[in-house]
Image (tube, rainbow, N blue to C red):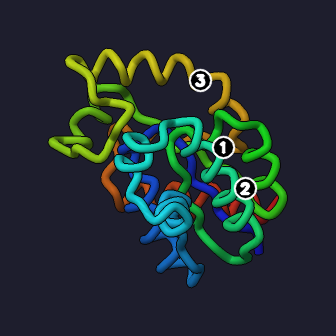
Amino acid sequence: MKNIILTGFMATGKSTVGRRVASIMNFGFIDTDSIIEKISGMNIPEIFEKRGEKYFRSIEKIAVKRASRLKNHVISTGGGVVLSPSNIVWLRRNGIIILLKARPEIILRNLGENKNRPLLFENNPEDKIKELLVNREKYYNFSDYKIDVSDMSIEEAVSAVIEVYRNYLKG
């Protein structure tokens, strides 16, 4: 069976929803950010602080290649994984890409006081979220399916992902 690839902006529920989908579907679960941390020996904020975004993106490509070789997995990707067309090619080889999207105010609410989001270390994080969403929109359009989770509970988002996947398998 093909992998379920969850992509989208940070704090749209990719990891939370992905773990639950994996459990229900008896799939494995992997988060590309965890692979990146394992490869680099640093957490994501440390990578950005010590090595920068360019280094992070290079390690992200390695993580995507490793994850894309798995079978029967839900793969949660980092919010910027779509910025590299090669990442999309790798992920699509053995998976369907489902975008989880949300309105900026929902993303900001979901982030709360989370300090592990280096791209949002700004005076006005909501403006930065809006800017990044606009910049990434064309990349998110490479997704096979899109689910707006803004007004969904986690359980509703899980059900929506499973429904999309099952419909995909039906052809």
- Pointer 2 with pointer 3, Cβ within 8 A: no
Q: Which mark is residue 96?
A: 2
Which residue carries the number 1 mark? 145
Binning the other alpha carbons within 10 Å of mark 2 as few (below 14), some (14 to 19) or many (20 upward) gives many
Residue farthest toward the front in the current orientation of the protein: 50
Residue 68 in the image, given as x and y percentages of width and height:
73, 64
Which element is circle 1 on?
strand
Q: In which quarter of the image is residue 163?
A: bottom right
Q: Quadrant of residue 4?
A: bottom right
Residue 66 in the image, given as x and y percentages of width and height:
70, 67
- Asked if residue 159 can be seen in this view, the reply is no
For the point 28% across and 29% down, the residue is 121
Residue 156 in the image, given as x and y percentages of width and height:
39, 56
Q: Nearer the viewer, mark 2 or mark 1?
A: 2
* Apparent side of residue 21 relative to residue 115 in the rendered image (left or right): right
Q: Residue 137 carries which label?
A: 3
Q: Which amino acid does label 3 sit on?
A: Glu
- Pointer 2 with pointer 1, Cβ within 8 A: yes
